[in-house]
Amino acid sequence: MRPRTLLKRVRDAWAGLLASPGGPGKVSRGLAAGAAAAMLPAFGLHLVVAAALAWILRGSLPVAAAACLSFGNPLTHLFLVPLEYELGRRLVPASLDFLPKQGPDWLLTLLPDAEETLAGGLLLAFVFGLAVWLLARRALAGKAAKPR
């Protein structure tokens, strides 16, 4: 398949998703849910998180799944996970001590890093989800208002 044909198919598929029933509000909430879920360090569970967020926000489930797969692919996680860890390291105070004192060594070694990565991922998910929602709402409302 030629690259131009593939690009046209992808564009047509996105156009079909963005024109889904429920209007621009539902689509923009679905995009925000998918973008936020993609930012979380929930490896392997991104689609489940995107579906849950879309349901909670009353957004479009297919749009949330497509956005989650677009934003949260393995190549983006090469950059996201270190960013999430660094953000979390700055957010979580070193004096915070609620982790277990006993357990397997591997778990006690990894838990502080996982805690910081999750904290940074939650912040990134909130900021990125909100930004995508605002941008999508404005862009889709503008398209809906234009006469054809």
Image: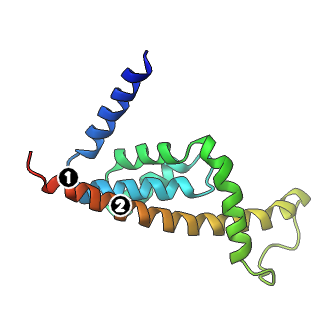
User: What is the image's colouring?
Assistant: rainbow
Residue type indicated by callout 1: Lys
Q: Residue 33, how many percent across, how many down?
A: 42, 57
Three-letter code for the amino acid on which mark 2 is drawn: Leu
Instruction: Residue 54: give x, y in percent of width and height.
Output: 38, 57
Q: Which residue is mark 2?
A: 135
Q: Quadrant of residue 57?
A: bottom left
Ranked by sequence position, the earlier of labels 2 and 1 is 2
User: Which secondary structure lies at badge 2?
Assistant: helix
**Corner quadrant of residue 41:** bottom right
Read off the residue under disc 1: 143
> Which label belongs to residue 69?
none
**Mark 2 and mark 1: span between their CA atoms?**
12 Å
Residue lying farthest to the right in this orientation:
105
Q: Residue 118, relative to residue 49: is it above or below?
A: below
Circles 2 and 1: CB atoms closer than 8 Å: no
Image point (54%, 47%), residue name: 72
